[in-house]
Amino acid sequence: MTISRAPSSRAVTDAEVRALEGNILTSTVDRFVAWSRMNSIWPVQFGLACCAIEMMSTAAARFDIARFGSELFRASPRQADLMIVSGRVSQKMAPVIKHIYEQMLDPKWVIAMGDCASCGGVFNNYALVQGVDKLIPVDVYVAGCPPRPEALLYGFLKLQELISARS
């Protein structure tokens, strides 16, 4: 007659560990926060010229900026973490841009959309700021006059890579 014994506690523990290894996700809080920031960028409304038309079409159904977690363009800088400066920046508008940027909560990012916002474009005169980076720090530059919505989406991808790399 043989006596049936329960499996040893060591064998059960190893089996449980193997079962749990496939079901547990480990990470750090910093990586999780960076992932959530990267996938929920909320831009503030700030269109200045013709580039703003392309920025608005990026939010439409054809290009669907909602894929990046940016379904709404926020009207308040306190609810946004991305400023897309699209178009030429006049000297009169410069203090407004700086003020809105300062009202945004940290962390915050800036995309300079179009040649005018990036470097002044074809307007090389005293009335326009020759690049918004003279006023506020810019994280991503999107070239074009005006850049297509696909270019802005590519700028979003580059911004997501930048946010992910900073974690």
Image (spheres, rainbow, N blue to C red):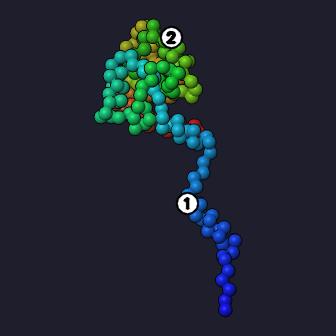
Compared with 97, 83 (above or below) is below
- Where is residue 118, by image quadrant? top left
Residue 118 visible, this orientation: no
Compared with 8, 36 (above or below) is above
Quadrant containing the C terminus in the rendered view:
top right
Q: Are marks 2 and 1 in contact (CB under 8 Å)?
A: no
- Where is residue 120, by image quadrant? top left
Q: What residue do we see at 32% from left, 27% from top?
A: 57
Question: Is label 2 or label 1 in front?
Answer: 1
Label number found at residue 37: none
Q: Reading the chain from its start, which is encountered first: label 2 or label 1?
A: 1
Residue to which mark 1 is pinned: 22
Residue to which mark 2 is pinned: 95
Residue neighbourhood size for the residue with mark 2, other residues' Cα within 10 Å, grouped as few (<14), some (14–19), many (≥20): few
Q: Residue furthest bottom?
A: 1
| In this rendering, position of residue 103 left or right of residue 148 | right
Secondary structure of residue under mark 1: loop
- Is 136 in front, or is 31? 31
Q: Horizontal and vertical percent for residue 64?
A: 35, 35
- Disc count in the image? 2
Q: What residue do we see at 67% from left, 92% from top?
A: 1
Badge 1 amino acid: Gly
Q: What residue do we see at 63% from left, 64% from top?
A: 17
Q: Residue furthest left?
A: 62
- Is 56 in front, or is 122? 56
Q: Horizontal and vertical percent for residue 82?
A: 48, 27
Q: Horizontal and vertical percent for residue 71?
A: 41, 31
Residue 70 visible, this orientation: yes
Compared with 114, 123 (above or below) is above
- Is 25 in front, or is 154? 25
